[in-house]
Amino acid sequence: SEFELVQLNKNSDNKMEVFEKELISYHLNISEDGLLRASYRNEELMLDCITSGDVKKLDIILKQMNMSSIGKMARSDLKQLEYLAVSGVTLATRAAVKGGLNPYEAYEMSDMYLQNLERCRTSSEYIHINMRSMKDFASKVKACKAGNEYSACVKKCREYITHSINQNISIGHMAAELGYNRTYLSKRFKAETGFTIQQYVMDEKVRAAESLLKYSDFTISAISDFLGFSSQSHFGQHVKRFTGLSPSEYRKKNKIVDFMTK
């Protein structure tokens, strides 16, 4: 009815008035606090580094970044850093996908970082996760772009291994799934990468183990089982062969987020 339309318009006008008052109040508060919002160009440069896989340039930008110039998103300093980190991980994820990182892998990484943020208790922990996520996404994109030099069959093989890293990967089964002759796939893979498929699978399993040892609090036994090793000792042998350290030694030395214990 006409009356309802009038009331709806009044409500909309009232909401706009409240919003404008809040916006004016926000501007006054940040002016009093001496805060200046970081330029959009700086954000663009940072995300461009992730999209292009330029890890060195990103590192320089992150070191120069002033966290106090981001704007005011919350009254609490910790909540401010939490919001900043969540938005940072989200933007970095999208930039990485734009740069060619497989969306499945990108969103898995995003989930991991967001879960880590839930356990942060100090400013330095929030900042660390925010910076670490951006560098890791840029590194992943860099590796992905390097992988673009490979032929279609080798790319498919690498993607298959990434998605099946927690399984017992059979070359014969993989070749059949991808629609290639096993001998042809094995020879092509070795010629282009310099590794046999078995060697590459083990490399990737150990890399996955390194990430889990650094970023999760799963037990060593659970990580071994998850990655499909026949035994914990077998797992330990391969980790030591690649890193020079036993799984427990590697975790103790490289644990990034020591605040993750519950």
Image (cartoon, rainbow, N blue to C red):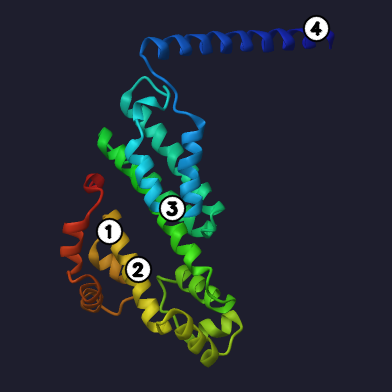
SS at circle 1: loop
Residue at numbered disc 4: 3
Instruction: Find residue 252 and report its image quarter.
Output: bottom left
Q: Nearer the viewer, residue 18 or 154?
A: 154
Q: CA distance from mark 4 to mark 3?
A: 60 Å
Q: Is residue 50 above or below residue 79?
A: below
Q: From this viewpoint, is residue 216 visible?
A: no
What residue is pinned by disc 1?
218
Q: Is residue 211 left or right of residue 22?
A: left
Mark 1–mark 2 contact, CB under 8 Å? yes
Pick out the residue farthest to the bottom: 183
Q: Nearer the viewer, residue 9 or 237?
A: 237
The residue that mark 2 highlights is 226
Report, in whole angstroms, how far the alpha carbon at label 3 lies from the one at label 2.
32 Å
Crowding at mark 2 (Cα within 10 Å: few <14, some 14-19, many 20+)? few
Measured Cα–Cα span from mark 4 to mark 2: 64 Å
Tag 1 or tag 3, which sits nearer the N-term? 3
Q: Amino acid at mark 3?
A: Asp
Which mark is first along the chain, 4 or 1?
Answer: 4
Alpha carbon distance from label 1 to label 2: 10 Å
- Of badges 3 and 2, nearer the viewer stands 3
Tell me what residue is drawn at x 51 percent, y 51 percent. Answer: 51
